[in-house]
Amino acid sequence: MPLTAVILAAGQGKRMNSDRPKVLQPLAGRALLAHVLDAARDIKPDAINVVYGHGGDSVRECFPDADLAWSHQAEQLGTGHAVAQALPSIPDDHQVLVLCGDVPLVTAECLKPLSDYGDGSEVVVLSAELEDPSGYGRIVRGQNGSVVSIVEQKDATPEQAAIAEINTGLMRIPGGKLGKWLDRIGNGNSQGEYYLTDIIAIAIADGAEVAAVPAGDPGQLLGINDRAQLAVAERVLQRRYADAAMSAGATLADPARFDQRGSLSVGRDVFIDAGAVFEGEVALGDRVSIGSNCVISDTTLGDDCLVHPSSILHGVIAGPKCEIGPFARLRPGTEFAAQVKIGNFVEVKASEIAAGSKVNHLTYIGDTAVGAGVNVGAGTIVCNYDGAYKHRSSVGDGAFIGSGVMLVAPVEVGEGATIGAGSIVTKTAPANELTLTRAKQVTVKGWKRPQKPAK
Ligand code: UD1
Ligand code: CA
């Protein structure tokens, strides 16, 4: 059966109390709508149509993907009115799969009961039994158990409100019938909206079969209307990611204190301590260990890398057996070969450091190519910025830079060069020689510190 997925994403989300359209609220670092689109793409429909409205083009601009069609709903008059905006672009022979931009934990797997049901002539609603059904539309069934209607919470009688079976908001409708059913819904309800759910009773009156099929895992169909529900969904999704990392070979000190906001690939025997946050695209090789409270984004770490606690890595590529932190800050353009050692309170930016080099304490390396086997002493600064321009520097293989050195860029330190502690290097330091700039030490004999007169 050809299929169009229609994703309802035009609502404001009043209960969020936010300036941002609801479907752009972040869940695991990505917009709610991005998660729904993942599930929609996974079922490989013939078309995906997103109904947008509140927030205008800001929603569209976040998803420039070529495979999406967009329908504009100028006024948010209800879910039925929203689907009607997409209708002109849906062929009559298509099944319409309605997804909600605010039901983001949905997966292709949990949509299966919808796509598997019947021969395509029916309306199929994905339902769920919830301990606390409040806020959702209730599935009303007749004496013989068949579906009669869906009643919104705000319009429900006390008896209907006691029904535990709810409408997840996801349904499949034959495209050829949808238009005439939508034409017949009104807005004479407590919210003054055109409810999509009203087509259920209309379809039945029209002689169509309506089925409500239970979702395999109701936890995946949580609707997000406020920030408390957003927080619940966040933990559900994080647990899903944590389980995936564990089954791929990572030990998590505490799966409840693990945050992945993007994609994470892990090798075997990886260890991730509590409170680590991963953002963007992160790849960890075999036996990598990540200390507690690290934030790691868009980074690739080779096998056996060791990242000590409270280190921040952003845009880093590191070879095997590097040791980083604690309290290191590595910024975009940082590239390490094997066995590079970066110690505490060291910042590195847009620099390549070759194998076996050590930068152990309190140092800034910016816009610099550092060779192999280099030792950079504590408190060394590359002065890469002159107030207008950034300049690149280089340090040759085997160089030894004493503590407290200022390398004023652009500058070159030759292979095997030694720089005396406290030097301010402004010119090329030749290979294999000692270079230092240092005022002679003097002692002023008999000098007395100023003192306040005794009282
Ligand atoms: C809706 C269902 C309810 C179901 C619940 C599941 C209706 C009338 N009610 O209620 O039965 O239990 O979802 O989560 O369908 N939207 C538009 N345009 C509009 C109105 C809404 O695009 O004019 C979008 C929203 O952005 C949202 C979705 O439709 O993504 C659902 O709207 P919302 O107002 O949250 O409906 P609920 O009250 O949650
Ligand atoms: Ca909702």
Image (tube, helix red, strand yellow):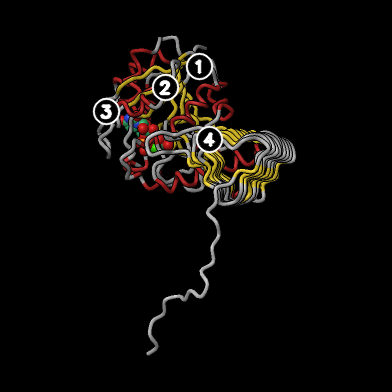
Disc 2/disc 3 C-alpha distance (Å): 21 Å
| Amino acid under disc 4 | Val
Q: At numbered mark 1, what does the secondary structure look like: helix, strand or loop?
A: loop
- The 10 Å Cα crowd at callout 4, few under 14, some 14 to 19, many 20 or more, is many
Of label 1 and label 4, which has the lower sequence position?
1
Between 198 and 298, the residue placed more toward the observer is 298
Between 371 and 449, the residue placed more toward the observer is 449
**Image quadrant in which the C terminus is located:** bottom left
Q: Which residue is mark 3?
A: 186
- Asked if labels 3 and 2 touch by Cβ distance under 8 angstroms, the answer is no
Disc 3/disc 4 C-alpha distance (Å): 75 Å
Residue 411: image tag: 4
Residue 6: image tag: 2
Q: At numbered mark 4, what does the secondary structure look like: helix, strand or loop?
A: loop
| Amino acid under disc 1 | Pro
Disc 2/disc 1 C-alpha distance (Å): 10 Å
- How far across and down, in percent of the image, does residue 440 sit? 55, 56
Q: Which residue is mark 1?
A: 45
**Residue shown at 53% from the left, 25% from the top:** 114
- The 10 Å Cα crowd at callout 3, few under 14, some 14 to 19, many 20 or more, is some
Q: At numbered mark 3, what does the secondary structure look like: helix, strand or loop?
A: loop
Q: Is residue 347 visible?
A: yes
Of label 2 and label 4, which has the lower sequence position?
2
Residue 17 in which image quadrant? top left
Between 25 and 76, the residue placed more toward the observer is 25
